[in-house]
Image (cartoon, rainbow, N blue to C red):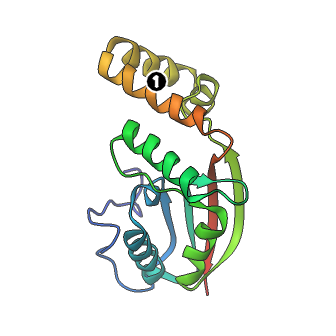
Amino acid sequence: LRGPYEHCILGSAEDVPLPDASRSVVYGEAMLSMQPQTVKERIVAEAARILRAGGRYGIHELCIVGDGASDDIRAAIAADLSDEIHVGVRPLAIAEWRRLLQDAGMSIVAQELAPMHLLEPRRVVADEGLWRAVRFAWNVARTPAARRRVLAMRRAFRKHADRLGAIMLVAAKG
């Protein structure tokens, strides 16, 4: 913690121990994709509950890109990612992510899409900086289980590169 206005609260994203309308910003990083639809809805509703009017909710998640991804394609992506990440990964299409936030009474104020380059060496350096990227690579290289997992995850991301991306959405509570 770095300042007098910063503190950490332990709890569930579905049941945050904060009063209604008590926050101006809520942020979720790559957690909704790992949840079933009903849990996604509860987490987003909880974020909306603790936001003040005009407050912002930002998310960064895995996303199905392109029009008309069939149920078979979506199932293949979910299966391949879940096999490698070892949790049930359920990315949504762009319109579904938007609707999830809108159904909780929020309006979309910003959206950005990016290709799924997670675990690509250039992306790791860009995200982490050279020293931390080298440390990450060293840890992966000397830990066989981690190396297998990282390489398998990167293979899954590459396999579905034409249909899998990252989405950032910011929504405002009305």
Residue found at x 63% / y 67%? 170
Report which quarter residue 158 is drawn in. Answer: top right
Q: Viewer-proximal residue, 92 or 73?
A: 73
Give above or below for 48 relative to 2: below
Is residue 53 visible in the rendered structure shown here? no
Report the side of 154 relative to 84 (left or right). right
Residue depicted at 46% across the width and 56% down the height: 90
Horizontal side of 7 relative to 57 (left or right) equals left
Residue 16: x %, y % from top left? 32, 73
SS label for mark 1: helix
Q: x, y percentage for residue 66?
A: 72, 54
Image quadrant for the C terminus?
Answer: bottom right
Where is 78 relative to 172, above or below?
Answer: above
Above-or-below relation of 124 to 34: above
Residue depicted at 55% across the width and 59% down the height = 71
Q: Nearer the viewer, residue 47 or 79?
A: 79
Q: Residue at x 62, y 35 (%)?
A: 117
Q: Residue 79 versus residue 170: which sits nearer the camera?
A: 79
Q: Position of residue 53 (x, y in %)?
A: 57, 86
Q: How many marks?
A: 1
Amino acid type for the residue under numbered disc 1: Leu
User: For this rendering, which residue is in front, 61 or 84?
Assistant: 84
Give the residue at mark 1: 151
Residue 130 visible in the shown view: yes
- Based on the displayed image, in which of its 4 quarters is residue 92 positioned? bottom right
Q: Please provide percent x and percent y for residue 24.
A: 53, 75
For label 1, count other residues whose C-alpha is less than 10 Å away and answer few (under 14), some (14-19) or many (20+).
some
